[in-house]
Image (tube, helix red, strand yellow):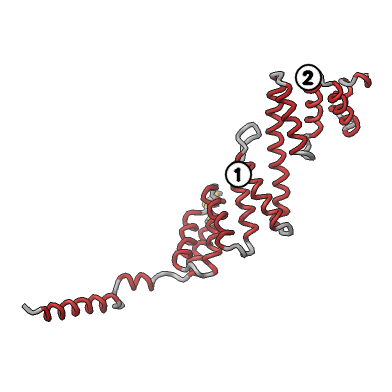
Amino acid sequence: MSSLPRLVLVVAVAGSVACGHFKKSDPEIVELEDIPSAEDLYANGIDALDGRQILFYHYVNHQAAIDAFQEVIDNYPYSDLAVQAELKIADAYFDSHRYEEALSYYQDFPELHPNHERVPYTILRSALCHYERVRSPNRDQRPTREALSHLDKVMSTFPYTPEAEEAELLWRDLRTRLGKSVMMIADFYMKRAEWQSAADRYRSVLNEYPGLGLDADALYKLGVCYTRMDLEDEAERIFQVILENYEGTEVADAAADLIPAAN
């Protein structure tokens, strides 16, 4: 049997398949033509975020918004709306308390768009994602330190932005939280009469977290530790500092009681 008819048949089948692939009636082509515009998809996401009122409750379908914005990214990845959609997805996750997912989008944004004007916003929001997981001073403070790392970056890299101003306020709050955490550890050692361990922590508060409202208490307790360790000269110097800088306070009165010359 000649191979020529078989070759003709193959070419004919291939040609028919190729032609059929580009027919207007092909389901895949129809599906592509039915994809809404980037503007319509983005508007769908905004509508979902606007939510609706159900009696006395305002309901927002954050997942529907996320899905709509993701469609913008998937179908129009090079449009300006795709960049805005990334931020909207991050915000939707944040507003629905899904902080891990939000953090992923916020942290990716500066890497994908390093020169975008919203980069300071995303770094601040990254800090807020960690902040929302911050625990009381007697618990693990890793989220606090992670948040502070992002706040430091905002303030140092974008010092003249509104985000830097907001970061500074939050930075002080979190630094105070860390200082209180160290104070609690120091107090724990002090109650157990482990004076050296307590003194080390009180000095750490004074050196690492000054000016946050913890100084007077840390100084006084450090002086007490020195007294119990028979370091009278060092203790008296600390009590004198308290008298000079915190006159009229309860801490100053307590310090005066422990200075022999003042009695």
Q: CA distance from mark 2 to mark 1?
A: 41 Å
Q: Could you tell me which residue is drawn at 71 percent across and 53 percent down?
A: 155
Amino acid at circle 1: Glu
In percent of width and height, residue 233 lies at 86, 23
Q: Is residue 99 left or right of residue 171?
A: left
Q: Position of residue 86 (x, y in %)?
A: 53, 60
Residue 53 seen in render: no
Question: Is 82 displayed left or right of 208 in the figure?
Answer: left
| The label number, if any, that marks residue 229 in the structure image | 2
Task: Give me the residue at 81% from left, 27% from top.
Answer: 220
Task: Please state if 24 lies on the left or on the right of 162 as rendered.
Answer: left
From the viewer's side, name the closer residue of 234 and 126: 234
**Extreme left residue here?**
1
Q: Position of residue 115 (x, y in %)?
A: 62, 65
Q: Amino acid at mark 2?
A: Met
Image mark count = 2
Quarter that holds the C terminus: top right
Using the rendered view, name the quadrant where residue 1 is placed. Answer: bottom left
Mark 1 lies on a secondary structure that is loop
Residue 260 is left or right of residue 66, and the answer is right
| Between 63 and 186, the one nearer to me in the picture | 186
Q: Which residue position is annotated with label 1? A: 132
Q: Is residue 207 above or below residue 155?
A: above
Q: Residue at x 47, y 57 (%)?
A: 64
Question: Does 142 sit above or below residue 254?
Answer: below
Observer-nearest of 138 and 48: 138
